[in-house]
Image (spheres, helix red, strand yellow):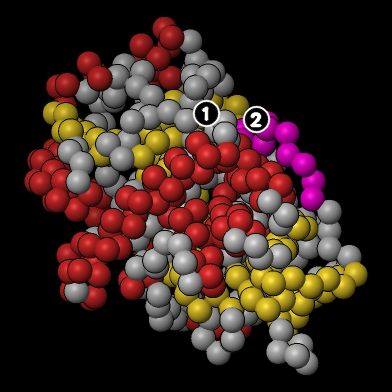
Amino acid sequence: MRLFEDMAYGSAPIEDSYWTTTVQRPDYPALTGAAKCDTAIIGAGFTGLNAALELARSGQDVVILEAEQPGWGASGRNGGFCCIGGSKTGLADLSRRFGQDHALNYMRAERDAVGFVQARLDDYGIEADTHSKGETRLAHSQNVADEMQDEIAGYRDVYGAEPEFLPREALEDHGLFSAEFYGALTAPIGFALNPMKYATGLAREAADAGVRIHGGSAVTEIAQSGDGQHLLKTAHGELRAKNLIVATNGYSSENLPAWLGGRYMPVQSGIIATRPMTDNELKAQGFTSRQMCYDSRNLLHYFRLLPDNRMLFGLRAASRTTEHSEAETKARARADFDRMFPAWQHVETAHYWSGLVCLSRNLTPFAGPIPGMDRAWAALCYHGNGVAMGSYTGAMIAGQILNQGPQTPHVMTGPMRRFELGRWRRAMLPLIYAWYGLQDRRA
């Protein structure tokens, strides 16, 4: 039982993904017959792979069951922004809900998550085409640009780093020009990477550490065995495990386990990537920076120049996944791209792909025990910032199982609220998008 049309969970949305052309990925065999382990993990994305690495390095026997192959879901199709983020709300709201100490603890975990990914890349020698010194937010109105300067002190206090503000007249000198931008605020924490290379490297390291990874092994049933262990059934096998981690994020099912029903909201994001551009083409637009960027809209655009001079450009996609809606999203992405970067209107769009990010009703990620299930945990809902926070959350969940490792902030431990309308909650998305669009025009 899943929320989107079947097309969202098939191969069509990533048939033309740029990331899949950049790395050779091994196929991990399907689970066949009966097997057992200490910890079973459903999902071979950033969360599941990082949890598996932590557990295996501590001596546990770990098995990952993945419906497709490692990195197939959001982990292998996102924009590659490893940056501060994870929640859909800020310090003031979190302080009201949880108290300032808990709120600050969570915000600093977002910072630590970036360092965690950098350490993973360094420790394992994963070459992931990293670049960008932090991330840059570009104001889509003068009002927003004026407000940006008031954010500097708060960022410094929370994260211990100094942002840099650029007024509109300085953007071209910094290679960040578009007539749509009124200013920029660069946060110095974060970097860009190739997410498929990162996911593929994590899977390789997990397998080398003894983790048994099974691709093509969608879990069809979760039950309890007679001896109190978890019994996971797939099309061709079954797995018994003492511990269970559900790390399926936006690709979750309403009934695996049943507790998830109504507690997560998949939202589509679409990305186009151009052909490689020449240096002269970049200069003609005045956008030559290697910074990973996003604009200040609620319905934001995110974009960056890749190492080979392709421009990656992403946006929130439609509330359905059909051939028609995918074509509409691709056309809208190209139209927005042409409006923001008119000097590149002649540059071909070589790739388009889409995928599901995941939101929670709490507006914060979840990482904790699954209510009503013994020795079972779930981790999900990174609000479009799963490269860093999804990775770090994998280590947090492993830490909960092992009673060691990074501590999970109280903000992330739940309980997860249900969305209004339950099974039909996706019907709210068009109204939410319309409201956000109105707010963006008024900003």
Q: Is residue 370 left or right of residue 436?
A: right
Q: Secondary structure at mark 1?
A: loop
Against 298, residue 63 (above or below) is below
Q: Nearer the viewer, mark 1 or mark 2?
A: 1
Q: Position of residue 423 (x, y in %)?
A: 55, 79
Using the image as rendered, state which of residue 145 and residue 407 is in the foreground.
407
Q: Residue at x 34, y 57 (%)?
A: 109
Q: Residue at x 22, y 49 (%)?
A: 159
Q: Residue furthest top?
A: 280
Any magenta on residue 18?
yes
Q: Position of residue 125 (x, y in %)?
A: 57, 34
Q: Which mark is residue 22?
A: 2
Q: Is residue 260 left or right of residue 119?
A: right
Residue pointed to by mark 1: 129
Using the image as rendered, state which of residue 71 and residue 353 is in the foreground.
71
Image quarter of residue 61? bottom right
Against 64, residue 440 (above or below) is above
Q: Residue at x 59, y 79 (%)?
A: 376
- Quadrant the N terminus occupies: bottom right
Q: Which residues are magenta?
A: 17-28
Dominant SS type (magenta): loop
What amino acid is labelled 1 in the image?
Answer: Asp
The crowding category of the residue bearing disc 1, from other C-alpha atoms within 10 Å (few below 14, some 14 to 19, many at least 20), is some
Q: Whole-Å distance between the Cαs marked 1 and 2?
A: 10 Å
Any magenta on residue 316?
no
Q: Is residue 78 left or right of residue 138?
A: right
Using the image as rendered, state which of residue 206 and residue 238 is in the foreground.
206
Q: Position of residue 366 (x, y in %)?
A: 44, 70
Q: Residue at x 55, y 90 (%)?
A: 372
What amino acid is labelled 2 in the image?
Answer: Thr
Q: Position of residue 358 (x, y in %)?
A: 48, 62
Marks 1/2 in contact by CB < 8 Å: the verdict is yes
